[in-house]
Amino acid sequence: MKKIKLLIISAVICIFAFTIQSLGAEQKIEPAYVNVQIFEGDSLWSVASSHPHDGMGIHAYIREIKTLNGLKNDRIQAGCRLIVPIYQRP
C-alpha cells in the first residue's frame, strides 16, 4: 500500500513539474530581429505599432526598441535604421 501511495505522489509531482515548465515556456517568446529603414514622418510609435509585439504593451515595446538601439530620447531621423525585435507567437 505504501508503494502505491509513493508511486501516486511521485506521478503527481512529475505532472505538476511538467505543467509548470510548459506554462513558463509558453509565456516566454524569444524575439526575432529586423532592421528597419526610417522614413520621413516615422516615429517610434509608428514603428512599434507596425511590428508584432505579442504579450507586451506598446510603451514597454518602445522602451525596448530605444534600449536596443541606444536611443536617449524618442527622436529618430529619416535615413537611419533601427533594429526592432519581433515578438510573435508561433
Image (cartoon, rainbow, N blue to C red):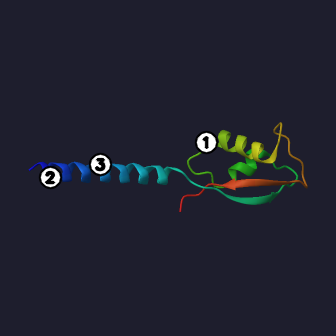
Of labels 3 and 2, the one closer to you:
2
Q: Is residue 41 left or right of residue 13?
A: right
User: Spatial distance from mark 3 to mark 2, Cα to Cα?
Assistant: 15 Å
* Mark 2: amino acid: Lys
Residue 62 against residue 82 in the figure, above or below: above
Task: Say what secondary structure mark 2 lies in.
Answer: helix
Of labels 3 and 1, the one closer to you:
3
Residue 83 point in image, percent of width and height = 77, 54
Q: Is residue 54 left or right of residue 76?
A: left
Report the residue at 14% width, 52% height from top.
Answer: 3
Task: Say what secondary structure mark 3 lies in.
Answer: helix
Q: Which residue is mark 1?
A: 57
Of labels 1 and 2, the one closer to you:
2
Q: Furthest-bottom residue in view?
A: 90
Q: Identify the disc placed on residue 3.
A: 2
Of pointers 3 and 1, the one earlier in the residue sequence:
3
